[in-house]
Amino acid sequence: MDDLRTILIQYEIESYDRKTFIPFSVLKDVFTKEAISSLMRQASIELFYHNEIIRTVLSCALRLFAILVVIGETKSIQKFIEADHTTQPDLDSKLPFDDETLKEIWSESDERKVFIRKQWMFLSPYIEADQAHRRLSDRAVLPFTAKEKIGAGGYGNVYKVRLAASQHSLNDAKTLSLLVKRLR
């Protein structure tokens, strides 16, 4: 498990404000069926659960599983699946989790705090053309690797930002600069 944790940490990208994020594309490459199976064996998850966990992680819980691997709670994936009351879980779509929701998984507040803090590194937004407006949490790690203030007005500030190549489908450029207006 430490090997995959180390691999994930090597793929961290630092944003302009020194927060880090890991692109979703990395998770798709790192978490193969074999890697997930190996992690479950290391976490002593009963063999009976392996197929369901692999299927769930690969279809709709890559981000959740990556968070659990990074915080050393791989075994808890089973609790998340059991706590989901639907027959077709989509666990990643429920992120970010808050403290109240996580009480069903962990009674100790330390585990919940670590999860809440680390989940944001896997939730950096992906930018696409013609995408509808999004309201992001103040805790969201924006995928901007550089930021320069270029103007200000009565309603806000304008910044030139560089968007990480892994976080957009706007063109094939390795780096892409955009203008962002932040309202006051």
Image (tube, rainbow, N blue to C red):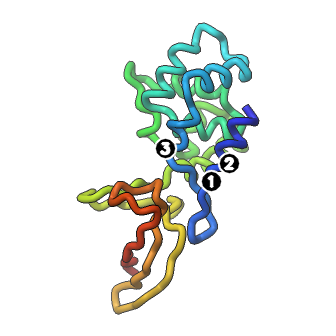
Number of the label disc, if any, that sits on residue 9: 2
Residue beneath label 3, please?
A: 25
Q: Position of residue 40 (x, y in %)?
A: 66, 21
Question: Which amino acid, mark 3?
Answer: Ser
User: 138 or 170: which is nearer to us?
Assistant: 170
Q: Secondary structure at mark 1?
A: loop
Which is nearer the N-term, disc 1 or disc 3? Answer: 1
Crowd tier of the residue under label 3, counting other residues whose Cα lies within 10 Å: few below 14, some 14–19, many 20 or above: few
Residue drawn at x 58%, y 35% is 30
Q: Position of residue 10 (x, y in %)?
A: 68, 49
Q: Tell me: residue 141, above or below residue 66.
A: below
User: Is 1 situated left or right of 56 in this image?
Assistant: right
Q: CA distance from mark 2 to mark 3?
A: 14 Å
Residue drawn at x 53%, y 73% is 146
Residue beneath label 1, please?
A: 12
Q: Position of residue 95 (x, y in %)?
A: 48, 43
